[in-house]
Amino acid sequence: MPYPKNHKQKSREAIIQSASRAFRKSGIDSVSVPKIMKAAGLTHGGFYAHFESKDQLVAEACLDGMKETIGFFRKIAKNLTPSESLIKIIEIYLSMEHLHKPEQGCVLPTLGSEVRQQSDLVRNSYTESLHELIDLLREFLPESYKNEAIFIVSSMVGAIMLARAINDPDMSETIIVTCQEQLKVHIRSLFK
């Protein structure tokens, strides 16, 4: 019995989503292609029918992870004012849940330390993901403060990266709480 016409596309999407979560949880180098294929419910042999290399998969998984993050934030911000949207995004991004569930969160803090040593293909996707998050925040900022999005994203990503990297739970929580509070103060000052 032949596969449905959309079988290949659905398989490809399952591989990308599986890889995106696995890379965010464990890092690029810690996740093998066979592990990704198994998590997607497919055999390892089928990988090259969908991707030329692991780098291509990493690049697409990075973009997919950011697409998921952007979609989630757009949904959250749907009925809020611009300042409320920014504050809500900051509260969600700089939360203990995001800290402890990297596979469900943003690709930027999770892959940041590894991407520098990856191929241009992967680095380009990571850079595009960064621009997408910055552009999203710019949508909510007053015209004269559009570049504040760079500061906000850098602060959020850096806080999560540091809080995940250290082995002091109290300091991790302090980093998250302090950065969240200070960014919210900053946002409120932009809308006065």
Image: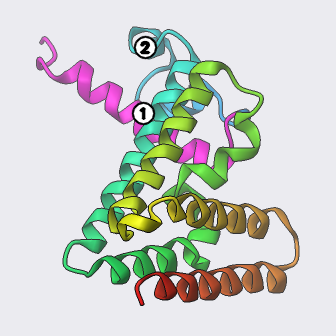
Mark 1 neighbour density, 10 Å: few (under 14) some (14–19) many (20 or more): many
The three-letter amino acid code for the residue at tag 2 is: Gly
Residue 21 lies, in percent from the top left, at 51, 47
Q: Is residue 120 above or below residue 17?
A: above
Given residues 31 and 106, the one toward you in this image is 106
Q: Is residue 168 left or right of residue 38?
A: right
Residue 153 in the figure: left or right of residue 160: left
Viewport quadrant of the N terminus = top left
Asked if the magenta segment contains residue 168, the reply would be: no
* Residue type indicated by callout 1: Ile
SS type, badge 2: helix
| Residue 10 visible (yes or no) | yes
> Could you tell whether 96 is left or right of 73 in the image?
right
Q: Residues within 10 Å of mark 2 (few under 14, many from 20)?
A: few
Give the x, y percent position of residue 90: 50, 76
Q: Residue at x 38, y 57 (%)?
A: 136
Residue under the image location 40 percent in, 60 percent down: 138
- Mark toward the viewer: 1 or 2: 1
Question: In the image, which residues are magenta?
Answer: 1-28
- Residue highlighted by disc 1: 16
Q: Residue at x 42, y 33 (%)?
A: 16
Badge 1 element: helix
Q: Residue at x 74, y 38 (%)?
A: 114
Q: Is residue 91 above or below residue 23?
A: below
Res 40 seen here: no
Image check: 154 left or right of 21? Answer: right
- Locate the C terminus and report the quarter of the image it occupies: bottom left
Main SS category, magenta section: helix
Give the vertical position of 4 relative to 177 (above or below). above
Which mark, residue 46?
Answer: 2
